[in-house]
Each structure stands twice: as C-alpha cells, then as structure tokens.
Amino acid sequence: MEEYAKSIHDPYFQPKTEVSMVTGHSLASRVWVPGPVIVGAGPSGLAAAASLKNQGIPVLILEKTNCIASLWQNKTYDRLCLHLPKQFCQLPFMPFPKDFPTYPSKQQFLAYLEAYAKNFDLNPVFNTTVVKAEYDGGCGLWRVQTKVTEYVCRWLVVATGENAEEVVPKIEGMNEFSGPILHSSSYKSGDCFENMNVLVVGCGNSGMEVCLDLCNYNACPSLVVRDSLHVLPQEMLGRSTFGLSMWLLKWFPVRVVDRLLLLASHFLIGDTNRLGLNRPKLGPLELKNVSGKTPVLDVGTLEKIRSGGIKVYPGIKRLACNTVEFVDGRMEKFEAIILATGYRSNVTTWLKDTNLFSKNDGFPTKPFPEGWKGDCGLYAIGFTKRGLLGTSMDAAKIAEDIACQWNTDTKHFKPLRHLPA
C-alpha cells in the first residue's frame, strides 16, 4: 500500500514489484494509466481518443470485441447507408473523402473509421471486457476492472454508447412459433427469405429498411407499427431534410420549423395516416428534443406500402405455431419474424455510479447538452440521441475539459507501468 500510494503521488517513483500472477478470476495485474481510460472503440470512443491526443494527452481504449466499430462491422445489414449527409457524420479533425457519396455506405463508413484510427494512431486493447468500474474516493482515482487486469486512472470516459445491447421484447407464444425469430442485428440481407412471408416488428429506420430490402429479394414482408411515428422524405427541395432543418432552426423556433417540415412532407409523400402510420401530436423536431425519438427518413419504403408490397399491422397479441394474432383480432401466417426493436445502453451493468447515468435506461440524467460530464473525472460520449454530430460535440468538450486539468496537474506522469497487485 505504501508503494501504491507513492506511485500515485510521486510521478518518478517506480515500484519494486512488477506483476504478481494469480489464477482463477483474481486480477493478474494492476496498471496505472496516466491519461484517461476510454471504454468502447466505436465512433464515440475513437472521436474522444483523437480529440484527447490532439491535446497531447495519451489515452487507453478498452474494447470488448476484436475490432473497432463492432456494431457497424458485425450487427448491421448489408444495404445500410448513413441516413444523414456525410458532413453531419464526420468525426473531429478528419472529413470524409471528397469522392464519397452524400450518404456513404456501410463499407465506406467502416473504411473511413479504419483510416481515422490509423491517422490518429489509435490502438485499442481488443477482447477486453470491463466488468466493473468504480471510483475510489480514498485515493481519488477510478478502478477499471477487466477479467485479468485493473486499470487505475484519474479520468474515465464511457463510450459504449446507446446501442450496446439488443432489445428483445417478450411476446406471448414465442417458444411456440415454428419459424426463425431473429433480431435485426443478425439480419444481413433478404436473400435467404425469398418467397417467404416475413413479419418485421418495429418501424424505425432499421425496420423500414429491412422491409424494403426484403422486397428487393422477392420476399413478402409485413410491418408491425405499434406506436405513432413521423416519416419524412430523406430530401426536400434538393437538400437533405436534416440539413434543411438545421438551417431553418437558425431563423425560426422549433414549432414553426416542425410545421414547415410537416407541410412539405404532406406535399411530397402524402398523408401517412392513410397507410397506417399515424403521426404523433408533437412535431418531429420537438418530439426528438423531448423523447429522443428519431423521425424515419424514407428511402423508398412508403411506395412499397402504398403499392401493397408491404402490409402494415398493429401490435402483436400472441404467436402460435406459424400464426400471428394481432391486437385488432386479425390472424395471419408467417414463416419468419425479424425484431427491429432497437438497442439499449448497458452502462449500469458495469459502472458503479449513480449520479451521471440513470439506473432506468443507462443514459445521462442531465438533458442535452449537459450530459457529457459527471463527477470525479467521469465523462460520457455518444449518449446524446443526436447521432455522430452529437458525438463530435461531446468529444470536443471532453478533450478541452481534461486538457485543462492535465496541463496543470499531471502532464509529467510517465507512461503505463504496472503497480503491485
């Protein structure tokens, strides 16, 4: 303990003991990290790391999988493209290549992220799952535990994001259904569903696009729409709807912009209520600010619904062998079910903190734009419900805040060294 205390307060002290190896689930080593520990190597973790390194601050990124952006690499469908124009999705200090299209594909976005990591020399520690992170008030440091190592640091950046774990709803009769039931994270393309009746549960951007993809592979998809939602055209007046919204908000309040967007949408795509897609009472931007619920940007699904290529149903009451009973009493036969029911945060399963993150949903308790900073050197990035644009905003704030402390207190700490376990 004396050596441990010295190692914390004396930057030039080198402990006598290296690493004591242990067996079982005990820690094999304890490592002092002079800069922040970032948990998660997705776009948020990479953005935070690059912003900190740009300030001259070393970082350690811990990633539970074997690659960066594992959600994009392993859990997205093949036809996925960015829903917003590339200028709203670029990470700090590095724009997308000029020859990329307005809406880069999944493969192009991953290539961009790989180039980003290489450009800023970001080298995450892969296959490293954080099982517990807790602030030690006695020494004023964070203890970040993996299965074999405890990392001790002054700053902890949570970058696991909004989409850490799949949401799989419990539906009566799921065990009785004879066909496959899979989450959209396992869906790649519709080639194995040709000529099959497929029910897609969930009407967000993913659910809408999966239905469209199934149509392109000659499947017969149906869509479960349980709640009201806003569907907007991806582009209006030759500009992206998102970009147009951002421009209008410079001149008009949110409610006025919402009225303009809905008026233009009604002219361009018609009355969605007639298609079984009822609009909420709040406008799309106001609803986004209040609940975080993102409007759907249509890329062709509405036309398939109008033509009958995609059928719309209300919520599910129960499942049977090969039959689905809906809450309105209708019963239809399906051969497969795809759950486009989204994701959730898993922060509260490993972070022992009750102030920054809510126990209910794993999101910051402070509303945007204040949810990026907690107490005792704890930070959050990628929880704004505002996509990659919100991630870049968080990254800049976190880097600036830590840099102020680093430059005055800890810039002379030496690189990683082992502490006695």
Image: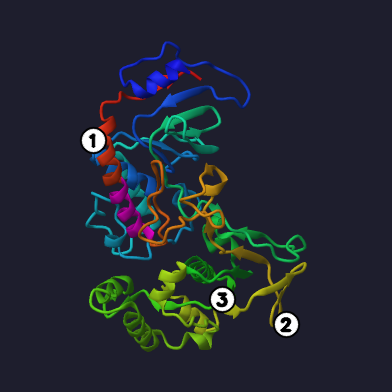
Three-letter amino acid code at the position of disc 3: Asp
Amino acid type at circle 1 is Asn
Q: Earlier in the sequence, mark 3 or mark 1?
A: 3
Q: Secondary structure at mark 2?
A: loop
Residue 54 falls in image quadrant: top left
The colour scheme is rainbow
Provide the secondary structure element on which disc 1 rests.
helix
Which one is in front, 194 or 127?
127
**Label 3: which secondary element:** loop
Residue picked out by circle 1:
407
First in residue order: circle 3 vs circle 2: 3
Q: Residue 111, percent across and down?
A: 34, 48
- Work out whether residue 201 or residue 100 is closer to the camera in this orientation and state it: 201
Residue 375: percent from left, percent from top: 41, 45
Q: Nearer the viewer, mark 2 or mark 1?
A: 1
Depth check, front residue: 96 or 391: 391
In front: label 3 or label 2 = 3
